[in-house]
Image (spheres, coloured by chain):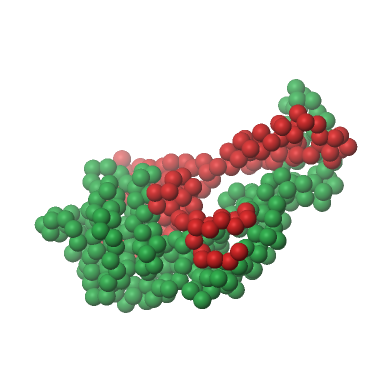
Chain colours: A red, B green
Amino acid sequence: MTGPIAQQTSGTSYVQNGGGGRGTSGLADVVDLILEKGLVIDVYARVALVGIEILTVDVRIVVASVDTYLRFAQAVNRLDIAHDGTAQGLPQVVQGMQESGAKSKTKGVLSGAQERLKETFGGDSDAKTKQPARRRSAKKQEEEDDQ
Amino acid sequence: MTGPQADHQTVPQYVYGVTRADAAPPNGLTGLDDLPVRVVAHGRIAALSSDLPSGRPLGERADLMAHQRVLQTLVDAGTPVLPFRFGAALADADAVRGELLENNADRLTAALDRVDGRVAVRVKATYEEDAVLREVIEDDPEIAELSARLRAVPEDAADAVHFDRVRLGEMIVQVLRDRRERDGTRLLSALAPFAESAVAHEPVREEDVVDASFLVGEAQRDGFQKAVDDLVEENRDRIRLRLVGPLPPYDFVPEGG
């Protein structure tokens, strides 16, 4: 099962090309990298006179702990009736399949909070923030306070 | 490369990445707002840029796709490229040439050399939920007991045991974390020998086991692929592995100054 690292399906692992125009799964696989990794322009240039406003999507998942806990509690609840001695009847099997086929798959999907931040490139490169976290939170706050 | 000279001399430029000056992106490659991507060269390195769309904030889904598309096009062609983080812009084409390329020629060239001939791939491993939950119940009597007790509670009385359900879920999450620690370390150490470097990302969901990027050398590719296939086989039915790439090497460019 060896082969080139590209577009190959093998067992439960599948290899796919990243991003670019390939629909939701493609972007989901790289969106955090696009926003949080890569070269940061501030480090490489004293940027002059370009004010651009950037709308970023915070890809970190926002799921309250309790919701997560309840999700797992529910998941084990439907899991295996056989465990406590009851044979799993057909209705339960069908229900289990439906749930795992639809409901559980949609849970845990990225639920990102969209936030808007205004980023103004000034002339002073020393004052630039280099941490994406600060760009998204502290800086945003400053900008909002300015308005 | 395209577009009227007079325009891009004065129009703010969005920068996608840096590549070799002799790299030739396909004709018709477009970026944000389908604007043509041009190659701004200085010496042996070049920036991929386009006019910066004006009059609106950037960051729409289409913008992110465009950023990724430009870089992925070069990666797919086997061209080394240093991706910029989304949102890089300079005042005009002269700034791209001077401030970015000329002033940083040495370190950008060195960074390009480090990714040239390698591919960046991302491995995501996720538990098959039912399988791992079965393991958790089988291995932990306390969880098994509470789970059985709650299962006996009729649906219409579920509210009365709300906090027990939260506690059950909390115990499961704790066990999952311990398990992830073990499984994650095992997966990473199986793959790391076949990569020049690896960057592990913090898993975001409870059922995530591993999320890591690897920079794989040409000579390592078959070995890496084989290692992934072996892991898929070993963990069949309990961990789902996905290998995504080759990707632009976002995780393998110099950080900070």
Q: Answer left or right for B204 relative to B44.
A: right
Q: Where is residue B207 in the image (x, y as percent from the top left)?
A: 64, 49
Answer with the quarter of the image where residue A98 lies.
top right
Which residue is painted at 23% across and 72% down in the image? B42
Answer with the quarter of the image where residue A125 lies.
bottom left
Q: Answer left or right for B157 relative to A136.
A: right
Q: Answer left or right for B177 relative to A124.
A: right
Q: Which residue lies furthest to the left in this view?
A: B6
Q: In this view, does B97 lie above or below A23?
A: below
Question: Which part of the image, by quadrant, shows the C terminus of chain B?
Answer: bottom left
Question: Which part of the image, by quadrant, shows the N terminus of chain B?
Answer: bottom left
Which residue is painted at 29% across and 62% down in the image? B25
Which residue is painted at 63% across and 55% down in the image? A11
Residue A133 visible within the image: no
Q: Residue furthest right?
A: A85
Q: Position of residue A17 (x, y in %)?
A: 46, 56
Which residue is painted at 69% across and 58% down in the image? B235
Nearer to us in this view, B59 or B232? B232
